[in-house]
Image (cartoon, rainbow, N blue to C red):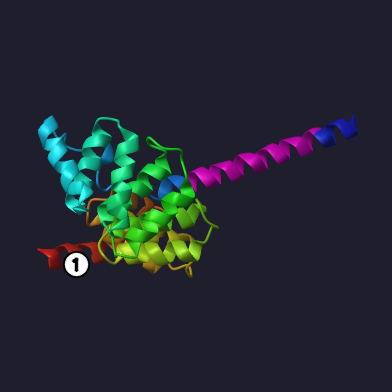
Amino acid sequence: MKKIKTATNIRIIFILIMVCTMLAFLTSCRHILDIEDTHNISGEELFNVSAEELLLYRERAERDDIEAQFMIAVIYLQNRNYEQAIYWYERAAELGDVASQLRLGYLHYRGYGIEQNHEQALYWFRQAAEQNDPAAQHNLGWMYYFGYGTAQSFEQAAYWYRKAAEQGDSYAQNNMGWLYHHGSGVEQSYAQAAYWYGQAIAQGNELARANLALLPAQYRVLSFINTLFFRRADE
């Protein structure tokens, strides 16, 4: 009987450990912000164009007119012609168009109209991030944070989140706060966590407000003062 009880207790402890681990993972996911669809692929204004207009766009696109390539890709995407949409996004992205690079990253990451491919998502986010696009920098940070398409690196996540945060990206500001809050990829600092949460809150980021509530009281006060100052300086 004692052996049975011991084995049962071990199983219970193992299950509790697994549950706690899963809860910790889910909590981490809930407190940092996901990939940004800054260019609103899913809810973009519809472009109603005639067959003649589409032909004109295509002629310009064939001559490597980046604006036309981007526009025709959007039109094809809205009509669920994913193959043509991705073809024209790639044409524009290879010519250095940041918006197309960011969209390709998003499509590969989500697997919209194409097989999900995190390595390709990482590649295109990096192309746009290196051109100083804050949404792409945030997304690249996200990829490193979770190890999507690359080896996990909190240090690289912090590097790219910071670049986006310093440009005013509230997603990245919240996530920088979370990294400082828990010392992931940076030296733990409640003061820095409060600062970055405050920057995001000043832009209406409600997740940052919820995260700030988890800090000790004195740091919540510090963040309130910083946020108040930030808002006044911006007026």
Compared across the picture, whether 71 is left or right of 140 comes to left
In the image, is residue 19 part of the stretch drawn in magenta? yes
Compared across the picture, whether 115 is left or right of 12 comes to left
User: Residue 209 at what x, y percent from top left?
Assistant: 31, 51
Compared across the picture, whether 60 is left or right of 217 comes to left
Residue 183 visible, this angle: no
Instruction: Choose between 15 and 83: the one closer to the eye.
Output: 83
Q: Amino acid at mark 1?
A: Phe
Dominant secondary structure, magenta: helix
At horizontal 43% and vertical 54% (from top left) the residue drawn is: 122
In the rendered image, the vertical position of residue 168 relative to residue 207, given as above or below:
below
User: Residue 65 at what x, y percent from top left?
Assistant: 18, 53
> 10 Å neighbourhood of mark 1: few (<14), some, or many (≥20)?
few
User: Residue 213 at what x, y percent from top left?
Assistant: 37, 52
Q: Tally the marks.
A: 1
Where's the C terminus, which quadrant? bottom left
In the rendered image, the vertical position of residue 193 relative to residue 148, given as above or below:
below
In the image, is residue 207 part of the stretch drawn in magenta? no
The quadrant holding residue 1 is: top right
User: Residue 215 at what x, y percent from top left?
Assistant: 41, 58
Q: Secondary structure at mark 1?
A: helix
At horizontal 38% and vertical 36% (from top left) the residue drawn is: 112
Looking at this rendering, what residue extends furthest in the bottom direction? 187
The residues colored magenta run 8-28
At horizontal 79% and vertical 33% (from top left) the residue drawn is: 8
Instruction: Choose between 85 and 78: the one closer to the eye.
Output: 85
Mark 1 — residue? 229
Residue 155 visible, this angle: yes
At horizontal 41% and vertical 67% (from top left) the residue drawn is: 159
